[in-house]
């Protein structure tokens, strides 16, 4: 068999395999990563699954940053905030997994999420954290609003609404701290 024929057969087999995989499990085609750039995508039967998976990843990314705050920040305000959000997001992750299992029968773990390294424990560490957490909250608010406009699943809508309220309030505090501590708007 020639190299070209063998290579062509491998490529054709790969394409058929991928197509067959999507045919058997079409939901995988709809499980793209959620980001503020493209929102949750179209309002289909997987909108809530994308939201739930995205929020689990969002919470895990926050926990990653908060572990750094616990290790590197000396500000009591940030230590207290970290304790509060760690408890809240840890419970939130459990609740989201339960929602995912209830609605979709999906028990898969979400292990892919952004891990932002906030750098050394220097005089700008807290500013880097505030900047990162402000953007982090704004992205979650945007995705939550997108979900509320597209979903009909009451638990997802309630979760998104609660997230918008909590994160909006928290954003005010984060921005005030950034202004007071670093004179940055």
Image (tube, helix red, strand yellow):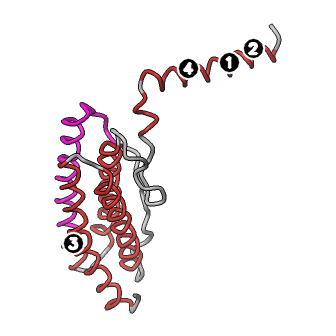
Which residue shows up at 22% across the image and 57% down it?
A: 89
Which residue shows up at 51% across the image and 20% down it?
A: 20
- What percent of the width, then of the height, locates residue 85? 21, 64
In the picture, the quarter occupied by the C terminus is bottom left
- What percent of the width, then of the height, locates residue 167? 25, 69
Callout 2 secondary element: helix
| Residue 19 position (above or below residue 104) | above
Label 3 Cα crowd, 10 Å radius (few <14 / some 14-19 / many 20+): some
Q: Are marks 3 and 1 in contact (CB under 8 Å)?
A: no
**How far is the residue under mark 2 from the one under mark 1?**
6 Å
* Residue at the disc numbered 3: 81
| Residue 11 position (above or below residue 153) | above
In reply to whether residue 96 is colored magenta, the answer given is yes
Callout 1 secondary element: helix
Q: Quadrant of residue 48?
A: top left
Q: Are marks 4 and 3 in contact (CB under 8 Å)?
A: no
Callout 4 secondary element: helix
Range of residues picked out in magenta: 82-110
**How far is the residue under mark 4 from the one under mark 3?**
48 Å
* Residue at the disc numbered 4: 17
Query: Which label is found at residue 10?
Result: 1
The answer to which of marks 3 and 2 sits earlier in the sequence is: 2
**How far is the residue under mark 3 from the one under mark 1?**
54 Å
**How far is the residue under mark 1 from the one under mark 4?**
10 Å
- What percent of the width, then of the height, locates residue 128? 41, 75
The answer to which of marks 1 and 4 sits earlier in the sequence is: 1
| Total numbered circles | 4
């Amino acid at each position: 068999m020639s190299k070209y024929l063998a290579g062509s057969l491998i490529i054709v087999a790969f394409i058929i395999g991928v197509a067959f995989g999507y045919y058997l499990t079409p939901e995988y085609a709809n499980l793209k990563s959620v980001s503020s750039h493209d929102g949750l995508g179209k309002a289909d039967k997987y909108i809530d699954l994308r939201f739930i998976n995205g929020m689990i990843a969002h919470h895990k990314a926050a926990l990653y940053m908060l572990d750094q705050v616990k290790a590197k920040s000396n500000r009591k305000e940030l230590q207290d905030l970290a304790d509060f959000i760690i408890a809240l997001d840890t419970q939130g992750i459990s609740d989201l997994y339960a929602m995912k299992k209830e609605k979709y029968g999906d028990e898969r773990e979400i292990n892919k999420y952004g891990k932002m390294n906030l750098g050394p424990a220097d005089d700008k560490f807290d500013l880097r954290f505030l900047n990162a957490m402000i953007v982090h909250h704004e992205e979650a608010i945007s995705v939550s609003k997108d979900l509320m406009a597209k979903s009909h699943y009451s638990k997802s809508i309630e979760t998104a609404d609660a997230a918008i309220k909590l994160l909006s309030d928290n954003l005010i505090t984060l921005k005030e701290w950034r202004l007071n501590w670093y004179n940055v708007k």
